[in-house]
Image: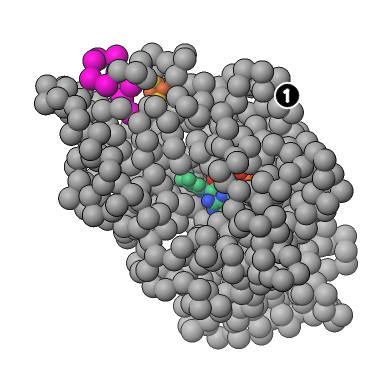
């Protein structure tokens, strides 16, 4: 072969122009399980298994389509300490003079390959993944280094650029850009019965699990030899169909709702498409067009607020956080604006906590490698923010636990949006909430050991006192923000005995964080 083309585990895009070239005889495609990718953080078992299974299936599909493919598992690569040594060994073995790759979406891999290109005897070069909607070299046009960029403006620019939900005269369809105020309902008891069961696959992954055990790959979480996540493009498309047919109609309406009551409906109206999107089995424009098609064909069932709400996540948020990541790396990875230093509590690894909301969000994450956005942001993320947990440790957990966690998307969401460690590059104010918000959006509090109405007693909801402790700790900088300044008036309304009792309770919670 004259060319070796390396495909990462999150580059399973069969529509890439690589595969459209007519002459393929002298090209060898390589897909490889590598210990460097299992070790950079401690991953959830389902995450490693899902990536490895999807890679194996992609390699088989390419082989069936007539491409020359080398799929290597951990047994085959055990003597290769890293990607660079694997590529060097294979290029020599197959006498290739050129190594090509698609640009990785993670800074660490991009850096590794750029160094390889400089130091290698082979011609090494990368090309676009052709996955994202905003071309990589236009990121600098939309995003400024270390500066806040409003997501809403970026999203509107993307709507116009791709002519999505626009009228002929360049105005937003329906007269509004954003229908958020129509969304965000709590689930009532009577709503629960209508939520469709989560669509789960039963992919046999026993051989991969056995291989990971044999190689003593250090993981956490459960798997049970069958995997509920899609591992082929066909399955990813089935999940998309399931979403459009059964979930889209209520997506926005219950986007922020949380419940611990429904075991079979644990994904509520969320699409769970993030893994399929982030591995590139599905293209974001394909998802958007499919949703628009459903809207067009079922105008009586599906309203604009649901469709706009969903498209904003993919055309807006997903592209936006990628822009923030690349424009601000590598400095972004070091940010700790609030100088948070506390260790992550142990219960993040086993879910044994008396706080029902935390117990449920963590337990579900450990069982399924998934939690929806508000569970990530307003339960676990909110708790870490209020408790001043070191953002490096918070990030290690999020990067490890979630099926869709790849650094370009996990880091801005965790370090930025949820922990405010970027000082407001993403969020203009920290996403904080006391138990009141959690009670409003979920049914967690009813079954909780703690009382959501209490603030200072020993049975008081920890979120209530931690909220005020956090707000006062950072009062000097937050009062400058008019959106937050008003909140301090509520604090001042409380008498000093009550204030002292709340702060004492918060300190007790922090000193005994592992016991909560
Ligand atoms: P849905 O609710 O059905 O939304 C549809 C799609 O929109 C998602 O599949 C996703 O591709 C996209 N999307 C929605 N919100 C965001 C967002 N904030 N950023 C980027 N894309 C978004 N998402 C990841 O893909 N990987 C991560 O590692 C990740 N880590 C997160 C960590 C924290 C602390 C928070 C608050 C959010 C994180 N998110 C992450 C964003 C979001 O929570 C997930 O994309 C979403 O929960 C995935 O589930 P879903 O496919 O059912 O999403
Ligand atoms: Fe969570 Fe507090 Fe509600 Fe318990 S009472 S579920 S700790 S918000």
Mark 1 closeness class: few <14, some 14–19, many ≥20 residues within 10 Å? few
Q: Main secondary structure of the magenta part?
A: loop
The residue wearing badge 1 is 194
Q: Quadrant of the C terminus?
A: top left
Q: Which residues are magenta?
A: 455-463
Residue 19 visible (yes or no) = yes
- The picture quadrant for ligand 2 comes to top left
Helix, strand or loop under label 1? loop
Residue at position x 19%, y 27% in the image: 494
Q: Closer to the camera, 83 or 114?
A: 114
Residue 341 location (% of width, % of height): 24, 45
Q: Quadrant of the N terminus?
A: bottom right
- Quarter occupied by residue 344: top left
Q: Closer to the camera, 489 or 51?
A: 489
Q: Closer to the camera, 446 or 410?
A: 446
- Quarter occupied by residue 190: top right
Q: Does residue 482 appear to the left or right of 158 in the view shown?
A: left
Residue 233 visible (yes or no) = no
């Amino acid at each position: 072969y004259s060319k070796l083309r390396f495909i990462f585990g999150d580059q399973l895009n069969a529509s890439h122009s690589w595969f459209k070239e007519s002459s393929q005889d002298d090209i060898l495609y390589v897909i490889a399980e590598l210990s460097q990718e299992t070790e950079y953080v401690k991953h959830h078992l389902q995450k490693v298994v899902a990536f490895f299974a999807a890679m194996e299936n992609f390699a088989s599909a390419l082989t069936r389509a007539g491409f020359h493919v080398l799929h290597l598992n951990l047994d085959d690569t055990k003597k290769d300490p890293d990607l660079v040594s694997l590529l060097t060994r294979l290029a020599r073995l197959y006498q290739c003079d050129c190594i090509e790759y698609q640009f990785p979406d993670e800074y660490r891999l991009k850096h590794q390959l750029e160094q390889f290109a400089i130091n290698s005897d082979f011609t090494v070069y990368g090309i676009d993944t052709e996955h994202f909607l905003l071309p990589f070299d236009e990121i600098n046009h939309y995003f400024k280094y270390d500066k806040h960029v409003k997501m809403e403006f970026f999203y509107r620019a993307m709507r116009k650029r791709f002519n999505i939900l626009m009228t002929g005269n360049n105005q937003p369809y329906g007269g509004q850009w954003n229908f958020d105020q129509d969304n965000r309902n709590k689930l009532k008891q009577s709503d629960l019965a209508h939520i469709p069961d989560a669509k789960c696959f039963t992919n046999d992954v026993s051989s991969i699990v056995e291989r990971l055990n044999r190689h003593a790959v250090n993981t956490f979480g459960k798997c049970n030899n069958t995997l509920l996540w899609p591992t082929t493009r066909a399955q990813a498309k089935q999940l998309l169909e399931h979403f459009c047919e059964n979930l889209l109609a209520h997506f926005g309406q219950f986007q922020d709702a949380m419940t611990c009551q429904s075991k079979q409906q644990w994904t509520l109206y969320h699409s769970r498409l993030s893994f399929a999107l982030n591995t590139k089995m599905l293209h974001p424009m394909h998802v958007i067009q499919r949703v628009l098609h459903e809207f067009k064909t079922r105008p009586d069932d599906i309203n604009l607020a649901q469709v706009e709400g969903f498209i904003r996540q993919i055309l807006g948020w997903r592209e936006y956080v990628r822009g923030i990541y690349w424009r601000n790396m590598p400095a972004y990875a070091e940010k700790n604006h609030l100088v948070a230093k506390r260790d992550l509590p142990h219960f993040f690894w086993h879910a044994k906590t008396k706080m029902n909301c935390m117990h449920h969000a963590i337990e579900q994450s450990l069982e399924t490698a998934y939690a929806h956005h508000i569970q990530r942001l307003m339960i676990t993320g909110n708790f870490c923010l209020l408790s001043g947990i070191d953002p490096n440790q918070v990030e290690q957990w999020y990067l490890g636990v979630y099926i869709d966690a790849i650094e370009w998307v996990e880091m801005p969401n965790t370090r930025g949006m949820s922990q405010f460690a970027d000082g407001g590059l993403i969020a203009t104010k920290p996403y904080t909430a006391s138990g009141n918000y959690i009670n409003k959006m979920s049914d967690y509090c009813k079954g909780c050991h703690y009382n959501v109405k209490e603030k200072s007693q020993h049975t008081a909801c920890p979120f209530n006192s931690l909220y005020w402790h956090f707000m006062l700790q950072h009062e000097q900088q937050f009062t400058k923000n008019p959106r937050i300044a008003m909140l301090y008036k509520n604090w001042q309304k409380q008498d000093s005995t009550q204030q002292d009792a709340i702060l004492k309770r918060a300190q007790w919670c922090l000193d005994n964080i592992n016991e909560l």
